[in-house]
Amino acid sequence: MHLGRFWRLLILLGTPLLLVLFGLYFYEPHIEIAFYSRRWVAQEIDSLAPLGGCFSADRPSSGYNISEHIYGRKKTEIQAGLPMRVGLDCYNFAGTIEGPTMYDLLDLNMGTLPLDQRTQYHTYWRADLAPFGPRQEWMLKSFFATQNIARTRLVLWSNGDLTRNPILQKYANNFPNAFAIQRIDIPYLARGTELDGVLPLLQTRDDKAWIDGDLIRLLVLWNYGGVWVDMDSLLTRDLEPLLEHEFVTQWDCYDKPYTPFNGALMRFHKHSPYICEAFHIMATSPPPRPKSTDWGSLLYFKLWRRLVAVGIPPFKVLPFCFTEGRSCRLDTRLPDPFATDAANSQGVRPLMGLDLDDGGDLDLILTRKIFGMHLHNQWEKLFPVGGWVERLLLKKFDERLSGVMEGP
């Protein structure tokens, strides 16, 4: 009697389990669950407020050529028109964008441009959160190893005085025309914008530097134009082929419904009406929530929707793998930069199982296809000795700079 019950129970429980295992053998599940407040969606997403008039004919932005920058003919297409979640499609698409690699740049340091004609690159470090050290230096090394320093200039912004930092002094001495350290003055940079004098917003910050970082990147690009690169990034290719467009970056390959964009790498011209409209949204919306992307991803999404609603071409969106190659499925993402090669070779192997050797498939993707790698903070983690990041990137940065830098 009891034995019969046991077998019935075993069949009752075992049959569904076998069906699940059978299904997993033949099918790959794609499941992502997120919960959003309906009230928040109605207020922040569904409500489509008008633009602030920055694109109006009677209100042109000083020095900004709408005919050229928005409607002008472009050489390079940076949007694929597909989400590119299958295989290596995104990485292969990145490879269709022609441009020099760090190995070619030795021949490009000719025709040095004056400072006012160079493409300005901007980044930011909160001096009160952590000291600027060797781990942060890798972003600088990646810039000077991959970008054409005869035609670009990197400006490091900070809320503190970093001019006496020995690491940064080394770069200031070696690249006097291509590197500068600036102390941020937010109220000054907000002059003439809709945020001018709105101190409750201008003084907003959090202990992750998300809110103030999102504000500062827009203020800096509004005043000076150029390219913003988050400090927790490593550049792997010259960005020049992308810069005829104004753009933000796709957050990941999943296309989150309300936060699809990322500002870790973004490019806008000085006094771009896109940024002007972003200021309008910031000034007329509720203050940002602490440790949120309200002034980042959500802001860019609101702006994009308002632009297309009135027939204005929106800014471009770089495909995720250009700099966010870690943000996709296990089998199509970049390997874990903080894991050993052995660990990356276990379980579901990244990049469809491509090899991690010098001169191999991953090496090709890093140096001739994608443009960078955003590490999403993780400052407490170290790159493994002998791991793929050290072999394929860090050592090559040092080798590239050994011929152009003096001092340790």
Image (cartoon, grey):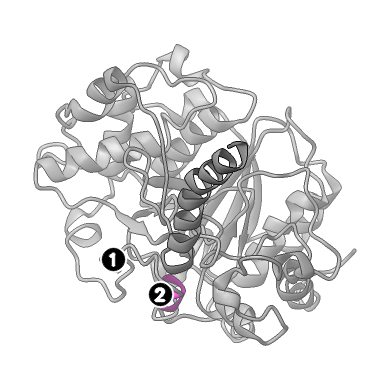
Identify which residue is drawn at 40% across, 74% down: 89
Quadrant position of residue 59 = top left
Q: Which residue is the site of mark 2?
A: 89
For the stretch drawn in magenta, the main secondary structure is helix
Label at residue 82? 1
SS category of the residue bearing label 2 = helix
Q: Which residues are magenta?
A: 88-92
Do the CB atoms of the residues marked 1 and 2 lie less than 8 Å apart?
yes
Q: Could you say where residue 165 lies in the image, as x and y percent from the top left?
A: 82, 43
Q: Amino acid at mark 1?
A: Leu
Residue 246's label in the rendered image is none
Residue depicted at x 40% and y 15%: 198
Viewer-closest of 166 and 132 = 132
Q: CA distance from mark 1 to mark 2?
A: 10 Å
Instruction: Specify whether residue 61 is in view.
Output: no
On the image, which quarter does residue 221 sit in? top left
Is 91 magenta? The answer is yes
- Image-based side of 303 in relation to 176, left or right: left
